Amino acid sequence: MAINTDKNSYTVIFAIVMVVIVGSILAGLFMLFRPQIEANERFEKQQNILYAMGINNNQGANDVVFIPTTEVEGEFQKYITRQVVLQGDEVIEDNEAFLIDIKKEATKAADPDYKRRLPLFQGQVDGKEVYVVPVRGKGLWDAIWGFVAMDKDMVIQGVYFDHKGETPGLGAEIKQRYFMDDFQGEGFLVDGQFAPITVAKGNNDPKNNLKNDQEVDALAGATITGDGLSAMLKKDIRLYVPFFKTLN
Amino acid sequence: MGLLSKKDSKLIFDPLADNNPITIQVLGICSALAITAQLKPSIVMALSVIFVLGMGNVVISLMRNIIPSKIRIIVQLIVVATLVIIVDLVLKAFAYELSKELSVFIGLIITNCIIMGRFEAFALGNGPWRSFLDGVGNALGYGVILIIVGFFRELLGSGTLFGFKVLGDSVEKTMLYALGYENNGFMVLPPMALIVVGIIIWVQRSRNKELIEEL
């Protein structure tokens, strides 16, 4: 049996059949694996939030080691005392607040009638109240995001940054200890006003000894990732300022 | 003669040495440089490529008489892409950390020249069983180089294998480090992968003079 595989009609039908078959196989597999993938993403978020609060398994000076996935659920319950959603002036308790997709919320917020839901996690580390907020923005190639842990005066206690596809060795370094640790001690409030922290290339303070200059020394060769990170902090942290003002 | 005929075993074993896709055909170099800083991702990448290339070759070979020649390349791409997405989903579900580490490169298996090369050169003209052997053989040849490079880069660059500190602790200064040994940080960077691949090519060609290309 010889099929004339050069005919146009055959080519079109072949293409359609193939796409349908391949599409259903992939859709089926995705449904099959979805619960497992969602659980992994959930653990990752919990690990990141705890990391920002300073709860991790770091040992060496350059380690970024999370609480293992098998324990993270329990540790999260232990350290996070309260999860809230800020919507307008309202503060709503919600134990699933960490599942809110802040990317979707940011898109919806383009509609002026929509009251954006802002998740916030409150926890206690060494007897000190810590508030963790999620941030999300754009790097050079793709999304960057993270969690910022602050005390009630918006002084940073710890951060965790991650990225989807920044350049290895340059922008991808935002998730390295030597960069993230520089943020500790910097504050977002100056005289009660919001003052964003920027990633600065000026080399004014390369060792990051000044904690009230609103600047963190930039990564060499990662200008756009750094600028994106500054913009992300400015845009997302600002939303939480009214809440922090009610704390004092 | 055991399980395989002589011709069939040639399909598996040739790409391991004298017709190696990386060192002889110089295909698939990009991923060989990118993910070999440690042994574990190298092995996962090798396994993923064995799966994708083995299965892909079988699928293409089964369809070789019905694929319209006009959209041949697109059909091949769809087959690779489907298999790669399956690998990606499985890794996301069962090896999440690793899938994050390999993220882009799993997707880039699609563009790995070895795969399209074997589809075009072999699977389109041979039966499923022989295509399967050819696919696995070439992927193994690719994997072997990946693992050799990963082994040396992790050992000399970080002093570990699979994350175990086989040479002692570089911070605490135990074992080798107590004698003044230092890790070579350069090994972790991609350029050293190229040099390691270069050394393998050199060793291989000096052992078998027939492999040396004429200028």
Image (tube, coloured by chain):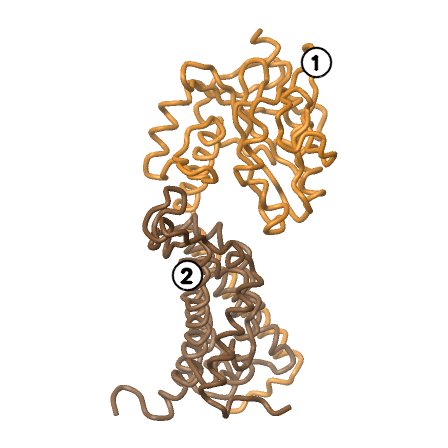
Question: Chain B rendered in what hue?
Answer: brown
What amino acid is at disc 2?
Answer: Val
Residue that protrudes farthest toward the right in the picture:
A202
Residue at 45% of width from left, 81% of height from top? B62
Relative vertical location of residue A224 with respect to residue B1 in this rendering, above or below: above
Total labels drawn: 2
Q: Residues within 10 Å of mark 1 (few under 14, many from 20)?
A: few
Residue holding disc 1: A193
Residue that protrudes farthest toward the front in the picture:
B179
Q: Secondary structure at mark 2?
A: helix
For the residues tagged 2 and 1, is the chain the same? Answer: no
Chain displayed in orange: A
Measuring from the top left, give residue B71's x and y in whole percent.
63, 77
Q: Nearer the viewer, residue A35 or B209?
A: B209
Relative vertical location of residue B188 with respect to residue B79 in this rendering, above or below: above
Residue at 41% of width from left, 14% of height from top? A127
Measuring from the top left, give residue A128's x and y in whole percent.
45, 14
Measuring from the top left, give residue B87's x and y in whole percent.
45, 60
Relative vertical location of residue A24 with respect to residue B114 in this rendering, above or below: above
Mark 2, chain letter?
A: B
Residue holding disc 2: B44
Q: Secondary structure at mark 1?
A: strand
Q: Residues within 10 Å of mark 2 (few under 14, many from 20)?
A: some
Q: Nearer the viewer, residue B82 or A44?
A: A44
Q: Which mark is residue B185?
A: none
Answer with left or right where residue A209 lies relative to residue A130: right
Residue that protrudes farthest toward the top in the picture:
A248
Q: Nearer the viewer, residue B169 or A45?
A: B169
Answer with left or right where residue B124 lies relative to residue A218: left
